[in-house]
Every structure is written in C-alpha cells, then in structure tokens.
Amino acid sequence: MSGETIQITYREAVRAAIREALDRDPRVFLMGEDVGRYGGCYAVSQGLYDDYGPARIRDTPLSECGFTGAGIGAALGGMWPIVEIMTVNFSLLALDQIVNNAATIRHMSGGQFHVPVVIRMATGAGKQLAAQHSHSLETWYAHVPGLKVAAPATLEDARGMLWTALTDPDPVILFEHVMLYNRAGTLAADASAVPITGAAVRRAGTDVSLITYGGCLFKTLEAAAQLAAADIAAEVIDLRSLRPLDDATLMASVAKTHRAVIIDEGWRSGSLAAEVSARIMEQAFWELDAPVGRVCSAEVPIPYPKHLEDAAVPQVPAIVAAAKATLGQ
Amino acid sequence: MTERFHMPSLGADMEAGTLIEWTRQPGERLAKGDTIAVIETQKGAIEVEVFHDAIMGRPLIAIGDRVPVGAPMAELEPLEGAASPSPSAPPAATGAQSAGGRAAPRGSAHRPEPAAAAPPRSATPAAASAAARPRHRASPAARRLAQRRGLDLAALTGSGPEGAITLADLEAAEARAGQPQPAPARRPSGGKADLAAMRQAIAAAMSRSKREIPHYYLAHDIDFTAAAAWLERRNGERSPGQRLLSGVLFIKAVALTLQAFPELNGFHRAGRFEPADAIHVGCAIAIRGGGLVAPAIHDADRQDLDALMARLRDLVARVRSGGLKASELSDPTVTVSSLGERGVDRLYGIIYPPQVAIVGFGTPRTRPWVVGDAVRPRTLVTATLAADHRHSDGHRGALFLAGLAAHLQAPEAL
C-alpha cells in the first residue's frame, strides 16, 4: 500500500470496482434494469454506459427471470457477467434461475460446467420505498448450497469484493444495503480485491459480541460506542460472508466475551440471526454466560411512513438494550 | 484427594437444610463421627457428622445458606499420607453440574482463566442424580467454571439475565470465600424444631407413605404378666434414675425378633427392597407442644437393657432440647412406637418411608384372660405391626408378632 487515501462514497467504491473489472477482463459485462442510459436506479453505474458502450453496459427489460437467466447462460458460455437486480425484493422473480440453475449446474453436470456469474442486489429499508422495495431477504440466498453470498458493508469491501467474486468459479451474490450507498469515507487509493469469505472484527471488545452485517454494521458500531460510555466493551463482528459463515471467528469472539447479540435487518423467524444463534449454541454453548440475544426487524411488511419504518428495523437503542440485557442490566 | 461433604438427607421428608454453625474450622483434624456443622431442618437443629477421618477443608456454603439435600457443604482434605477413603455418604449431587466436563469448543484457548487466583479444585465431580435437587438458573459458562472449581451453584445468588448465576457471580463468590467467615449466627430456633415446619414435614412423609406403601396391619395380644413382674422386681432394687421403662423391653424384643425377619428391617429404595445390615430402631418420641421424631437407637439387638435405657433417656432429652445428630435421624431401619402411659389399647402405625415396617405397642393393662381352663387377670399388651406388603406378607408378619410375644415371655433374656 502506498498509504495514499482518497475520499469516496460506497456508491463510488462499487462503481470503481465495476470499472476495474471491466478494464481487467474483456469477459466482464454489466446487465440489469436501467443500468445503462439511466445510470442505475441507485446511480451506481452512472457514466459507465458512455465509457464502455451498450455491449458491456446492457439495459434489460423488466424481467428478472429473463435477464438473470441470460446472465447465467452467458456465464456458462464463458463470460463473467455482473447482473444487477434493482432490489432483492424483485429477485424473487429470478429465484428459479438462481436456485434451480445457477446453484445446481456445477453439481448436476458432474463439475463439467461452472457458473461464474455475480449478481448484485440492493437490499434493506430506510428510504421509504415501502414493503415491496424494502425487505432484507439475504437469508433466503444464504440458505442455498451452491451459492456464495456476501454483504459488503465497508468501503474496502464495496471496492474489493466484486473482483474476487468474479474470479470465483461459482455464482456469487453481493448484497448492497441501500442506506450504505451515500456513506462517505477514506479508502486507500490503491484499494483492490479482498476475500469474499471470512468475518471481520470491526471493533474489539471483551464483554459482549455484537454480530451483524450489511446495513446494520454502522448502527452496531454506534451502539458499541454508546456501550463503551457505559463501561461495556462490545466487540463488533461484521459477518461479510453470509454463506459460508465464518464459524471460527464467531466462536473465538464468543469464547472471549461469553455473550452474543446478533443484529440482523431480516425478520427474526428463520433469519440469519437464527442461524448464527444456533451455531453458537452448538459450538460454544459452554462459553455462554447469557442467552444469545437478537435484534431483528419487526415481523411486518416494512411500512412506508418514516416513523414506522424506523420502528420496524433494528436501531441503536435496541442494540444497546439487547447488549446490556446479556449483562443482566 | 479433596472430597466434598454433602448436605445429608435426614429422612425422606427432608429437602433442604440451613447451615447454622460450623463446629470445626478448616485445617482441623476430624475423626469419623465428629460433628462438623449444625444445620437447621424441619426437625430442629441437627448436628451433622463426618463419615470418615479427614481434615476439615474449605467451606462451600456460608452461615445462613439454605441448600438442598446433596449439595456440597464443605471440602474435606485427606489425612497426610492416608489413602483416599471412599466416602460412605453417597453424594447425591447435582444434575446441574454433571454435564460440564466435555471438550471445550473451538476458540476456548483464548479464554482468560484467572488461574493464579484459583482456589483448590475438587478433583471429583459429583455423581449425578438429577432428581436430587432443583435446577439452578446459571449460565453454561458459569456451570462449567463451577464444575471445574468445585463450586456449588446452589449457594450463590445470580445477577445475570433473569437472575442467572454468571461467571461474575462465581468470581465474586470465590473472592468472598477467600475472606474470613462471619461469626456464627445464633441458632434461629434456639435448637428446637419449628413446629409448623415439622408439621409440614410429618404431613409430607405420612402422605407419601399412605399414598405409596401398601400397608397391611396385624394385631396380637401378648401376655405381659411375667415381664411386668420382672420389671417391677428389678426396678424395686434401683433408684428412679436407673429404672427401666417397659418401652425398652419392647425395643429390645423387637430388635431381637427382627434378626429372624430381615424383610421387615430395611428400606424400599428405587423400587426394590434393601435389607439393612444392622438393626437400628427408630423410637417415636413426642415433642412437647406437638410433633414427633423417631431417632435411632443403633444396634438395638446387641445392647443390654441398661444401655438401651440410657440411650433412650439421652434421646428424649435431646429431642426436647435440640442437638440430635444427623445419623440418628437418618439411620433407623425400623420404627417402634409405644403410646406407653397414654392409655390406648392399640395403635396402628404409618410406616416412615423408606422403612418397611413399624411396630406399635398399646398400654399394658390388666384384663381377663383365659389361662388353661380358667379366666385369670393378666397384664396384656397389644402389639401391632404395619408392614409394607411389597416386601412381606401377613404370614411372615404374624410369625414376627408371635416371635415378639415369645421374647417378651423371657424378660431376663432380653
């Protein structure tokens, strides 16, 4: 590293990653709804159409099943497609392509074919886009063997995960939380590829492990700062990879803190938080000094009104309260 | 090897005891049978004894702590150079701690262990008997640490979520254990039983007995004339303090008769009969103001009448003043109840579980009785047997009462 840094937003970091991929390998192309002339509904691909042209920045019809299938077919044909699905809510139309084709073909072909497609999806609530645009369904994909699922939350990961995902021979799904796109910060000017597996300790602590990913990472870090003011040293773990989960990092943290709270914008029932909690119970039961806590979204379709939307998803005070509860406070 | 002394069970009706006093201090040498502590039970303040020679070790509970039967009370260190004896008291201990010692999960190597400050650990995890005590709310990590350190969760109060005992509570308890014990509290009841509590205990034991034990009852009128005359002669030569009561004749005669009836002398445990290897007669003794206890006269078949009388007087005095020993309450293998001077003709006893028999005596009184061809005034006493039909039958019971009658015809041989 040169030590030189730049100011950048998450959106720009993702865009820089796409540019790097397009520059590095001619097999790479981007396709999705409004990614071309419009510049992407979250403006991630702004300017790419002009620079790379319609062959590599391809607008598609409003048909997730169709264009995701086309992306999978292109990957089978030797391309490295980046498929952008506007939000995870719409990806349900493409579930059959992703679950029944992308995830299975390597196995069903006896390893003769692999599907190096990368599917980017926006996810999460916070922009008052109501129930059909705001859900966090990451866990549905994290459930499926044959997929790798990652959730870049930091600028480094937004900048670095895409290339690694493209070079992976199997389908990778990248979740970009809509509330992260505008986050700005400094990034090494020469930032490049990072692994798409493995969790990261974003803040070290000894009293409670706060385990989260994606859009909840910064709320959790804020909660950890508030807890520190109350003399509680919270460790914040960013899962980064939702499939596979990095059990070793999680269990090492729980072995140190003996307490865990999982913060997950998904609904509680059958959530990633449930999976992580179960694994802690299976692998670190005798380390636990308190029941594992969870802060998840209320089990309602995400509401449109701002105050209700805020109330429905994990917020800092709830994270602080859950962490304190594990300490009997 | 460090062992632990557990809260003894002083009968089927005892669930827990409260520590009133340590009578021995850590480091003191103990001989089998020494009293090491006084506990408050529903039967009053009871002295508890060690089961073998040892050195008094670290206390695991504090004065005033109420802990369930089977909970560890103190550590016992082996005598210098002595082979580790096996404790004769079966440690009825914690299901709670039994699951602890498995391999640590991944990552546990990172776990900070304040090993330097650790007190001596008990090397023998208690055997499990999950039913012996209620489950304490304690975190898995606290359970594992308690198991490793030989700490008793029952003695702690939790500060964690929902009142659970946590690692921090254990550390605080260890810190406290390193400090001097508070001065012994005054015996809450002055050594005497709390009558309401005793009533509850009797109610529980007798209800259980009537619910679970299929009693059969036999009664037999025994000619007590010869024995009464022998007693009168003998007591006439003695000062009042040396006189024998008819009760000791009954106790001795029952004990001698039981030698031939092992199925009436022992315990019903875990669905089976366990014959006792000695005859310890529990003597029902009424407490002034209400309630009763039945402490043991040990080896009643092997003691002479004067020794038995002395023991009986001693027991009566201590029932009334406090100071019964734990073994006296837990050891009886059979019970004898005599309503002596109270004038009833016969009593039908309720078996005290887990015993399997109780022998009752009414008041000896002069009644018309056919001797040969004539009706004569004779002194008669009615003996009854209530026995557990799971382990004996009326036929054997009848033979027992006949044998008892025979023994009472030869009082000088008792």
Image (tube, helix red, strand yellow):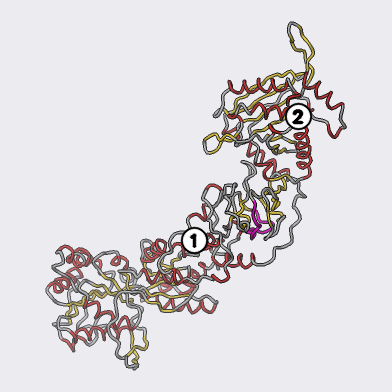
Mark 1, residue position: B140
**Closest to the observer: B218 or A12?**
B218
> Quick one: which residue is furthest to the top in this view?
B373
Q: Does label 1 lie on the same chain as label 2?
A: yes
Which region shows up in magenta?
Answer: B53-66
Taking the magenta stretch, the answer to whether it contains residue A299 is: no
Mark 2, residue position: B247
- At x 15%, y 83%, the residue is A26
Instruction: Give the CA separation, mark 2 to mark 1.
Output: 56 Å
**Closest to the observer: A314 or A235?**
A235
Q: Quadrant of the C terminus of chain A?
A: bottom right
Chain identifier of the residue bearing label 1 in the image: B
User: Horizontal placement of B178 versus A230: left or right?
Assistant: right
Q: Is residue B177 visible?
A: yes
- At x 69%, y 65%, the residue is B180
| Position of residue A10 measured from the top left corner of the image (x, y, whole percent) | 33, 83
Q: In the rendered structure, which amino acid carries the disc numbered 2?
A: Gly
Q: In the rendered structure, which amino acid carries the disc numbered 1?
A: Pro
**Closest to the observer: B67 or B148?**
B148
User: Horizontal placement of B367 versus A42: left or right?
Assistant: right
